[in-house]
Image: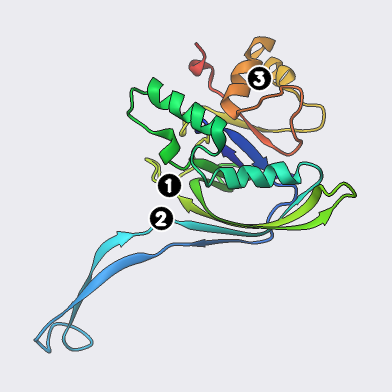
Amino acid sequence: MVNALLVCTSPPMVGTVPFDFNPDKIQITRDAHFHSYGSASSNTGTPAGSTGSTFKKAEPLKISLSEIVFSGLETKPLCDQLLNWMSPGAGKLGQAVGGAMAVMSAGKRNYTNHLPIITFQWGPPQMGFLYQVMLQHTQISYTRFNRHGVPVRARVAMTLQEQPSLLGTLPTNPTSGGLPGRRGHTVTQGDDLVSLSRTHYGTTARWRDVADANAIDDPLRMRPGRTVYLPNPDEFD
């Protein structure tokens, strides 16, 4: 089974939130705005006095996920990650890193004044869900705790708002913006980056490139069901 997840590759808020249980329902809404101009003539349309509507703008997609369940000792850290994604430069460390990134970019972007871009993915890119979004709303209900007072179960509802992309809602790769030639691999029990590198590139030396493309910190620990994207060999230095 492939699990849905949220992936952020925007510094300094890089992180991944995998779903323990996939959503039962995904609601997607979009609003279009247009204006209708009246006419003094009774012969301009039906009903009388009407004219055609003029398009003004289309709002970004909004994706609503409800009854997302997190379970286990990682419940609180995963929920905290969601909340941090809604606060630019959250915490002193985030502000320090964001300030450093702004200096490195010669002041062209202030990372502490922008929410991070997150990718929501579930299923194969061509047939499932793959959107670049910002996290607009999060509601967390902690429903179970262990004897030490640590949350071990939570129900989460969230609203994601699509962000502008050159490809719109066409399938894109969350870490590359849709570079051609990338393939997806669904992780199974026993998979690690070293074995994937050997299988797909004929050498174990490319495991770090795969890790960087998917923001994986520990190459020996990957959650079964996750989709790992395999860079095109042309991307290697």
Image quadrant containing the N terminus: top right
Task: Name the residue rendered at 36%, 32% in the picture.
Answer: 109
Q: Are dots 2 and 1 in contact, CB under 8 Å?
A: yes
Task: Identify which amino acid the numbered label 2 is placed on.
Answer: Pro
Q: Give x and y (percent) for residue 26.
A: 60, 59
Task: Name the residue rendered at 34%, 59% in the picture.
Answer: 58
Above or below — where is 176 with respect to 87?
above
Dot 2 or dot 1: first in sequence order is: 2
Tell me the element at label 3.
helix
Q: Give x and y (percent) for residue 229.
A: 60, 30
Q: Which residue is mark 3?
A: 200
Task: Identify which amino acid the numbered label 1 is placed on.
Answer: Gln
Disc 3 to disc 1, C-alpha distance: 32 Å
Above or below — where is 133 with respect to 95?
below
| Residue closest to the eye, 77 or 64 | 77
Which numbered disc covers residue 60?
Answer: 2
Toward the front, the furthest residue is 92
Q: Nearer the viewer, mark 3 or mark 1?
A: 1
Q: Nearer the viewer, mark 3 or mark 2?
A: 2
Task: Identify which amino acid the numbered label 3 is placed on.
Answer: His
> Viewed as shown, does residue 108 lie left or right of 202?
left
Dot 3 or dot 1: first in sequence order is: 1
Q: Is residue 58 visible?
A: yes
Q: Which residue is mark 1?
A: 163
Tell me the element at label 2.
loop
Task: Name the residue rendered at 71%, 23% in the picture.
Answer: 218
Q: Is residue 180 visible?
A: no
Q: Give x and y (percent) for residue 106.
A: 33, 22
Q: Are dots 3 and 2 in contact, CB under 8 Å?
A: no
Disc 3 to disc 2, C-alpha distance: 37 Å
Task: Name the residue rendered at 49%, 18% in the picture.
Answer: 235
